[in-house]
Image (tube, rainbow, N blue to C red):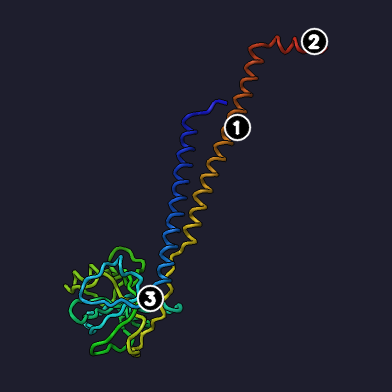
Amino acid sequence: MKIRLVPALLILIVMAVTIRLGFWQRDRAHQKEVLQAQITQYESSTPQTVGATPLALKDIEFHRVRAKGTFVPERVVYLDNRPYNDQPGFYVVMPLKLEGGGYVLVNRGWLPRNIADRTAIAPYVTPPGPVEVVGIARANASRAFELGAGGSAAHQKIRQNLGVASYAAETGLPLQPFVIQQTGFVPSFKDGLVRDWPVPDTDVERNYGYMLQWWGMALAALGFGLFAARKAATKARGEGEAEARVDNPGREKEGSAKDA
């Protein structure tokens, strides 16, 4: 069977790429499984203290933390389009001036939004003096989809998103490179904010699903290649037999005479 080089190469390339992408998705799933195990382990660990000494995000993310300091309410930012139980609302993000120096952003919790007036902020309480905050270190205060940066313009109280580095540059505050997702106060303090945070989901199943899709595409490419090769071989064999009959018309008659 004669194989056509260009179509065969194209099929091999498609198979190689899709198989490699399948393995990449499998590796991503394994990485997320390791991360999920670490998150579960961190949930029962002793909270790490956040102070003036800068902490690397990679060393602190998802860890339980505690920080002592005083809130800076004049620097508050409200992150819009953060629903809770299908109700629109805001996340209240506020710097905490740490004892001994430095600052850290704290995602204090959720507030419902006024449907009639988006800029009307529901009442909540900010402790006026030193407090101890406990929570989870996160890379940001959650991300919401936005087109461009129009909803996250600097110096606005209501924004769509808030990056730690950009906010530090905007305010000049020496911020830790993470946000504390607050789970409470020590001792307990009622401030009117909802802190029923969603459980971190690494979405491992999606990666395994993509893995199977890529490998399925590789099998489909192989099947298509075998089908096309067989069809081409059948066509070539038929054309060869037809040419043989045209080139040797007497052979068929001779065969018929012998049969008679």
Residue 31 sits in quarter: bottom left
Direction from residue 56 to residue 188 in the image, left or right: right
Residue at image coords 42%, 57% = 28
For the residue carrying disc 2, how many other residues have a C-alpha within 10 Å: few (<14), some (14-19), or many (20+)? few
Tag on residue 103? Answer: none
Look at the picture and state if 11 lies above or below 43: above
Name the element at disc 1.
helix
The three-letter amino acid code for the residue at tag 1 is Lys
Look at the picture and state if 154 lies above or below 33: below
Name the residue tied to disc 3: 45
The residues bearing labels 2 and 3 have C-alpha atoms spaced at a distance of 95 Å
Residue at image coords 51%, 57% = 209
Name the residue tied to disc 2: 258
Please identify, in this view, whether the residue under mark 2 or under mark 3 is nearer the observer: 3
Name the residue tied to disc 1: 231
The three-letter amino acid code for the residue at tag 2 is Lys
